[in-house]
Amino acid sequence: MTKKKSTTATFMLELPVVVDEGAARRLRAHLEAARQLYNALLSQGLHRLHQMRADPAWQAARELPRSQKQARKHAFAALRKQYRFSEYGLPPPPPRCASGGWPSI
């Protein structure tokens, strides 16, 4: 399946963020916390994907003929449910701090 290229012109403007030293430090801390959370969730998702694909039921589902669409669909859906491999199946983000926001440095 090929994607059609957009014929609409797209422009991007990058502007530097001008902040004082304290705000820059807080911004770096927030971005680092977000990066670590993202990487932890990505790692958890990839771990579940590898476990799911190592399951013999995965190979059995793959061997079902593509003409049996409903059977394949149900087999893969059962595996995704068993391994909690869905958009909302990953762990929830950590609760907010007592201060009501991101941790401060």
Image (spheres, grey):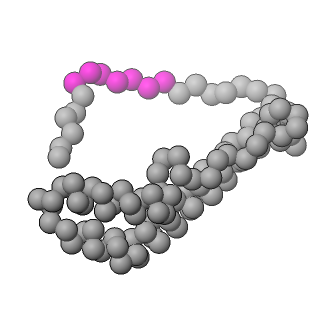
Above or below, 69 relative to 26: below
The quarter of the displayed image where residue 16 is located: top right
Q: Is residue 99 visible?
A: yes
Residue at screen point 25% across, 69% down: 62
- Point 38% across, 60% down: residue: 78
Answer left or right for 41 relative to 63. right
Total count of labels: 0
Q: Residue 10: say if magenta.
A: yes
Check the image and report above or below for 63 versus 4.
below
Q: Is residue 69 left or right of residue 80?
A: left
Q: Is residue 62 above or below residue 97?
A: below
Q: Residue at (24%, 60%) from the top-left corner?
A: 72
- Left or right: 44, with 5 as reference point: right
Q: Where is residue 12 shown, x and y percent of the image?
A: 44, 26
Q: Is residue 4 left or right of residue 28?
A: left
Specify the segment rendered in magenta. 7-13
Image x and y of residue 30, in percent? 73, 40
